[in-house]
Image (spheres, rainbow, N blue to C red):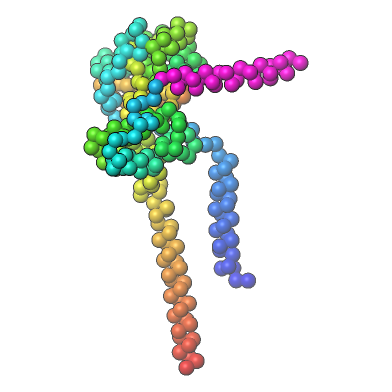
Amino acid sequence: MMRLLFALLALFIGPTLTMQQTFAQQAMPPAPYAYVQLEDPALEAEAAELMGTLRCLKCQSQSINDSDAPMAGDMRHQVRTRILAGESPEQIRSWLVERYGDYVSYEPEVSSTTWPLFAIPLLLLAVVGLVLMRRLGKRRSDAEEVN
Amino acid sequence: MRPIYLIPLALFLFFAGLAGYQLTQPKLQNIPSQMIEQPLPEFTLQPAFEGLPGASRSDFVGGQPRLLNIWASWCLPCIAEAPHLERLEEAGVEIIGVSIRDRPEAVASFLNQHGNPYTRIGADDISALMLDIGASGVPETYVIDAEGNIRYQHIGDIRTDTVPLLLEILEEVR
């Protein structure tokens, strides 16, 4: 009976606690450029392209462009204000990578941990090329023998 | 069948096994900051409420090593770490707070309820300092040496066993 009571209590209190939390967090207005686009469409396009390849640190596998997490909004604000101040998208990406490592970027760079990503396709192509050359070479020599 | 034809199957099984194994592993929760052993970036933050001054980089330079505690009144683990911050303060550590996306009245009532271990609290309404030091959540605590360099990052709430660890590191970087 007590257990049931606790379960019911948790059912009611749980959501109110999390709601309080989200409400409190949303009570602050978002950063100016979290949900506001840059006036210049060219600059906004540059920012949007970059934001689509930066990882939201608070979410599971979402870019900061796709996320409504308050921190993603703050990151969008940083990207837009920095673009507006004349920084290039790559400068902004490396500013974030310097702080969070490769984790924050969806565009992998060649590094000590990521090199297999780049090396394996080349290796596979080389293997395929070798196999093809041997087979085709063999077929040609077979054909010559028949002639 | 020639054994060479088993290679694709073996490769497939290897990758399926790898994926299966990774699915059983917990998600990487902590994203460590790359700013350890780097100077604390330049910043100036307004007071988070009327009771204490705001915070800037210069508050970390000179004297003793200090703690930089990133927190917020809306953050539940911050309630859990409040008594441990008090213990650090009682041990003579200066703790400078930075509150994230917080309202002054919420900061004041949190401190009333859970105690105030801070000498200063800066208000970071747009996570500017948070992003600049590579913090990815609330709460996080950084050890800053007297030259203003970041020496250690603790991710998540400070627990009973974190207190002696932080005291030890504060002593080490002195």
Whether residue A66 is visible, yes or no, is: yes
Magenta segment main secondary structure: helix
Residue B115 image point, x, y percent: 45, 7
Image quadrant where residue B72 sits: top left
Left or right: B136 in relation to A39: right
Confirm whether the magenta stretch covers residue A120.
no
Which image quarter is the C terminus of chain B in? top left
When the figure is inspected, residue B74 is found, relative to residue A68, above or below; the finding is above
Q: Quadrant of residue B36?
A: top left
Query: Where is residue B154 shown, x and y percent of the image?
Result: 42, 25
Task: Check the image and report above or below for A113 versus A69.
Answer: below
Q: Which residues are magenta?
A: A1-28
- Return the x and y of residue A63 as percentages of the image width and height: 43, 39
Q: Is residue B60 above or below residue A36?
A: above
Residues B4 and B57: in front is B57
Residue visible at 43% across and 70% down in the picture: A129
Q: Residue furthest left?
A: A86
The quadrant of the rendering that contains the N terminus of chain B is bottom right
